[in-house]
Amino acid sequence: MALKFNPKPGTLLLCDFSTGFQEPEMVKAKRPVIVLAGDFKGRAKLVTVVPLSTKEPEIIEKYHYRISRKSMPMIGKFQEQDSWVKGDMIYTFGFHRLDLIKLGTRGSDGKRQYYTNRFGREQMKEIYSCVLSGLNLDNLAKHL
């Protein structure tokens, strides 16, 4: 199901990378992403995100950032191992590629429950710094 609202920075979503990509681009069908920027005037239904991977980089660069599984949703696949921000691979996607993370439970009203927590200020500062490094703009990180 496609996203129907503008998510705020720090929101964790699932993104469909299954169409229109070829290696070395992201090609895994569904992958978690963190929202970097959402609601911009003139950019209706577009969100800028940074993808996550559970595979630890062979060489950890400044554009990689480890996110502990404790910061992720408390459901199976997110608790298997830590995740890594791929700060050198930012994307802007339409809502049709993005979805909330289903928790696999229903509330007392019978509706599906979704993960709605966001990454906090300190973690987002590290994530933005990582993304700036991925753009070769490390010198701007000191202004965060």
Image (cartoon, rainbow, N blue to C red):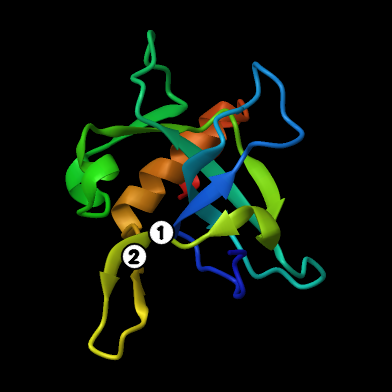
Q: Is residue 29 above or below residue 60?
A: below
- Crowding near pointer 1: few (<14 within 10 Å), some, many (20+)? some
Q: At numbered mark 2, what does the secondary structure look like: helix, strand or loop?
A: loop
Q: Quadrant of residue 40?
A: bottom right
- The residue tagged 1 is 101
**Percent x, y of residue 93:** 69, 51
Identity, as a three-letter code, of the amino acid under mark 1: Ile
Q: At numbered mark 1, what does the secondary structure look like: helix, strand or loop?
A: loop
- The residue tagged 2 is 115
> Spatial distance from mark 1 to mark 2, Cα to Cα?
5 Å
Left/right placement of residue 20 relative to residue 89 reads right
- Crowding near pointer 2: few (<14 within 10 Å), some, many (20+)? some
**Closer-to-camera residue (131/2):** 2
Q: Quadrant of residue 60?
A: top left
**Percent x, y of residue 114:** 36, 69
**Percent x, y of residue 91:** 66, 42
**Closer-to-camera residue (64/32):** 32
Whether residue 57 can be seen here: yes
Residue at 76%, 73% (x, y): give it. 41
Left/right placement of residue 131 relative to residue 92 reads left
* Residue lying farthest to the front in this orientation: 110
* Badge 1 vs badge 2, beta-carbon distance below 8 Å: yes
Q: Quadrant of the N terminus?
A: bottom right
Residue at 63%, 38% (x, y): give it. 17
**Percent x, y of residue 124:** 39, 51
Identity, as a three-letter code, of the amino acid under mark 2: Tyr
